[in-house]
Image (cartoon, grey):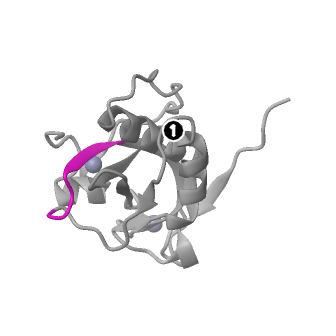
Amino acid sequence: MAKKKRTTRASTWETRASFVFPSLHDKIVEAASDSLLSLWFKQNGNDNDSNRRYSTYVNGTFSCASRTCRTAGWSSGKVTILIRRFGENGYDAEVFNQRCRTCNCLGKLTLDEQSYVDRVVYRLKRWAGIATDRPPYTQKASPPHRSALCEGCRRGVCGQVNS
Ligand SMILES: [Zn+2]
Ligand SMILES: [Zn+2]
């Protein structure tokens, strides 16, 4: 039987350029518990404090934040996520919003939890030097990444040289 898909709405459905999901930290800890101990989530981290950064994609669905727009919403397998490491065990992950192709309003994100956990844990293990299989290929069939509608592109995060 197919497992029910778990999703997390961005908190309070605010529309912002990007979101963080500290509420998913417990799931990260659980998924990494075979090899990474003492992980902690960095609050209000920034690029300057971090010693590692990596951008990749997760899955999510969006609805348009405009009350007057009649678009049905959209799903994306290319929702940009920027994962950062702080010290040895600290990390955060910023997920970038997309804009509605009909009216250009910011979207409201509903995040696919499993893709988030897979990507973050995989990256933290790689940074820790732990051999690990690539995460299961969970990326959805999805239109190409549209830079004009992506807040990650606007911040220069997408496809940046990963360090
Ligand atoms: Zn719209
Ligand atoms: Zn982008």
Classify the position of ligand 1 by quadrant: top left, top right, bottom left or bottom right: bottom left
Judge whether residue 77 can be spotted in this image.
no
Q: What residue do we see at 26% from left, 56% from top? A: 87
Residue at the far front: name it. Answer: 37
Residue 60 position, x and y percent, is 52, 50
Say few, some or many: other residues with alpha carbon within 10 Å of mark 1 (under 14 / 14 to 19 / 20 or more). some
Please identify the quadrant where the C terminus is shown.
top left
Regarding mark 1 in the picture, which secondary structure is present there?
helix
The type of residue carrying mark 1 is Asp
Query: As rendered, which of 128 and 96 lies closer to the eye?
Result: 128
- Residue 12 magenta-drawn? no
Mark 1 beta carbon near ligand 2 (under 8 Å): no
Q: Which residues are magenta?
A: 48-56
Residue 15 position, x and y percent, is 44, 74
Judge left or right: residue 129 versus residue 157: right
Q: What residue do we see at 32% from left, 74% from top? A: 44
Query: As rendered, which of 124 and 65 lies closer to the eye?
Result: 124
Judge whether residue 57 can be spotted in this image.
yes
Q: Is residue 60 above or below residue 32?
A: below
Q: What residue do we see at 28% from left, 68% from top? A: 45
Residue 133 position, x and y percent, is 46, 21
Query: As rendered, which of 78 and 161 lies closer to the eye?
Result: 161
Residue labelled with disc 1: 118
